[in-house]
Image: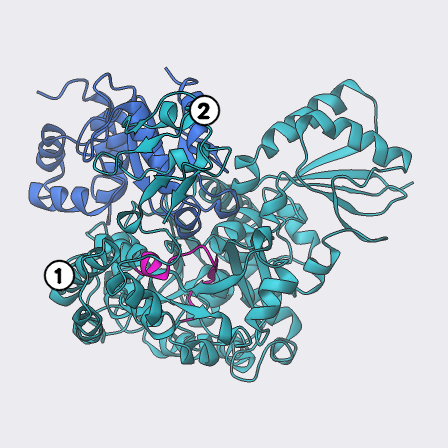
Chain colours: A cyan, B blue
Amino acid sequence: MQAITVKVGLASCGIAAGADNVYRRLESYLLESSKMVQLKRTGCIGMCFEEPIVEFDGGDLGRVTLGKVDPKDITRLLDEYLSGHLSETHLILADKHEAKHNDLMGAQTRIVLKNCGVIDPQSIDEYEQSGGYQALKQVLEMRPYTVIDIVRGSGLRGRGGAGFPTGLKWGFVFDQPGPKKYVICNADEGDPGAFMDRSVLEGDPHRIIEGMLIGAYAMGADEGYIYCRAEYPLAIKHLRIAIQAATERNYLGSNILGTDFSFTLHIKEGAGAFVCGEETALMHSIEGMRGMPTLRPPYPAESGLWGKPTNINNVETWANIPWIILNGPQAFRAIGTQQSPGTKVFALAGKVAGSGLIEVPMGITIRDIIYKVGGGIKDGKNFKAIQLGGPSGGCIPAELLDTTVDYDSINATGAIMGSGGMVVMDEDTCMVDVAKYFLHFTQSESCGKCTYCRIGTRRMLEILERISSGKGEIEDIDRLQKLAENINHGSLCGLGQSAPNPVLTTLRYFRHEYEAHIVDKKCPTQVCVDLLTFSIDETKCKGCHVCALRCPVKCITGKRKQPHVIDPAVCIKCGSCFNSCRFDAVVKA
Amino acid sequence: MLENTDKLDALIQKYQGKDGILIPLLQEAQELYGHLNKELMLYLSARTEIPAAEIFGVATFYSMFKLKAQGRHVIKVCKGTACHVSDVDSIKLALMEQLKLAPGEDTTPDMRFTLVEVACLGCCSLAPVIMIDDKTYGKLAPEDIVGILAKYT
């Protein structure tokens, strides 16, 4: 009989949902009993909405995955699995029979996430058993330029968002004179609503190291940095363990695997500055300075870290490299579209039923991502828009749901592919509020170097605040457009250039919502608090007094069993009366 | 006058003469002292010969560096997109009300809590999310706050 294995998904989101308690319960249970069961940790399985997630394998039922597992139930579920009669309450995936989310996984193609949620990220043995470091071994027998040719042939484009051809970028660094060159992994994933890189670093750190080793060998670099957000402590921990293990096996260090190639890899923790995701700012931050972007050219390929030729790629780009080497450029091109080959990892979040980490072939439609991979909109509401690319991106409306996911089609909508944050918005989301939210973010993250970005974003934010508080004028729309254009032209780096995108796309597709705020002084979705009024419908009010007790400013008065009244002059519009009324007597308008 | 500088001196020793040391040096110094005050920054400047203005410039550029003393427990309110559309603002209001913090204040007078906003904690499927020290609380409603805060002294 095959050994039974139990895997618990212990990435950050799993732990946040209580997966570590499930793991500890299993650990003590297996210690007490004499069951022949192997307990393992793994990374993000991807279905964050079902966390904590546990996988059983090796029994008669084959591989099954259980979701929303409570520590109290886990030992019973394990016993059921061992006896071959598993109740279906927690079942989400199964290899041998029907399970509720089998379809969601079926629509995905996994290259970057191949090992995530499968192997133990702290075990180099498991990475090797899954084919790890084989690509490096192959590469070390090739001429460096052959490696660059393979990457160029694959058509891989930078997954950080801009989509620059990776092979071309590597070629620039290859052409520079040595001997000192650097490679950098940009893991400063700062877009709110994006957690792709974190999941890959936590779940499969060796893949990044192997990708960087291949790049370093091809370009002639002997030193590298992984610049990771300090907000990702588990990713940093797993990277440290991986670097240590890879060094012990001579995948890192001097004369790697008996060749002339040597490579040292450092981890650099960020200190909390969104702009450091921009490559020149990132390098200044590694140098220990304020992370402020500088003018390009010279590009990092010519003069990067400490003035040396440097190549920067993001986590997902590096993670694609070992697969491309092992399977060849044609196999990569067979996935995705002509201009955007391969897959893309997205962090699907917001008002979608199945939020989590997904990897889909390029060329899939946004509709399929939301409805086939994401399981549709939460609570049966209507889809309104999808936000791509975080603060640099834009909102794509319902009428463009059939837009395909590739760099060029997404750019045509005014949004950008971005690094992979995908936030779904439903009918309850106010688009003026969303634009204001992103502007607030970029305004506070602007490093302050360029006047248009520093002051222009503040002026745009002020206009948006005016509109959402009912003090807007119709001319404000033109002012926003004019400012947006100037900020785009007058800023040095991507942060400033793209800062107006959320405003421009919402103006393009949801202009009527702006007009409702400005002309009718109404927020159609009742999100903008200043435009709301709360009152009590006296025909419905039973005088139960619950709202008056909940009201933080005590502005609701009335005798018991008689209709109550809200004093609008005192009301702070917190909504607690609306939420606490059991008779729907509080009217929000 | 800065006291107990033994550990700090050892730290400076560790980084002395290396490239790009300022950020990790400040990170570790902050771990020792809880925050970076003027005295500490001047001390570092004198020992490392990095101009005090440069140290102050870096310390004020990155949000991780704190120039004021922090409460015993740090509450991070996630301001990610998914949390924003899930009305994390109502959670923040409930926190401020319970902690009796006026707008603009972040630390309770008894130094029990410091309340900060962070860009994104990356647990978007649990929105709205807050994190107290290193424990994450997700799928919150304003009513949950009283019970959660009671766990911390």
- The structure residue drawn at horizontal position 62% and vertical position 69%, both measured from the top left corner, is A368
Q: Quadrant of residue A488?
A: bottom left
Q: Which residue is mark 2?
A: A544
- Which numbered disc, 1 or 2, marks the residue that appears first in the sequence? 1
| First to last magenta residue range | A416-435
Between B106 and A507, the one lying in front of the other is A507
Q: Under tag 2, what secondary structure?
A: loop
- On screen, residue A177 above or below A578: below
Q: Amino acid at mark 2?
A: Cys
Q: Is residue A149 visible?
A: yes
Residue A149 is left or right of residue A501, and the answer is: right
The answer to whether residue A427 is magenta is yes
| Rendered location of residue A476, percent (x, y) | 18, 68
Question: How far across and down, in percent of the image, does residue B125 sit?
Answer: 52, 46
Q: Residues within 10 Å of mark 2 (few under 14, many from 20)?
A: some
Quadrant of the drawing holding the N terminus of chain A: top right
Residue drawn 32% across the image and 32% down it: A565
Q: Residue at x 55, y 52 (%)?
A: A206
Relative to A531, residue A545 above or below: above
Q: Residue at x 66, y 53 (%)?
A: A128
| Number of other residues with Cα within 10 Å of mark 1, as a class: few under 14, some 14 to 19, many 20 or more | some
Q: Which mark is residue A455?
A: 1
Locate residue A60: give its quadrant: top right
Q: Which element carries disc 1, helix, strand or loop?
A: helix
How many marks overall?
2
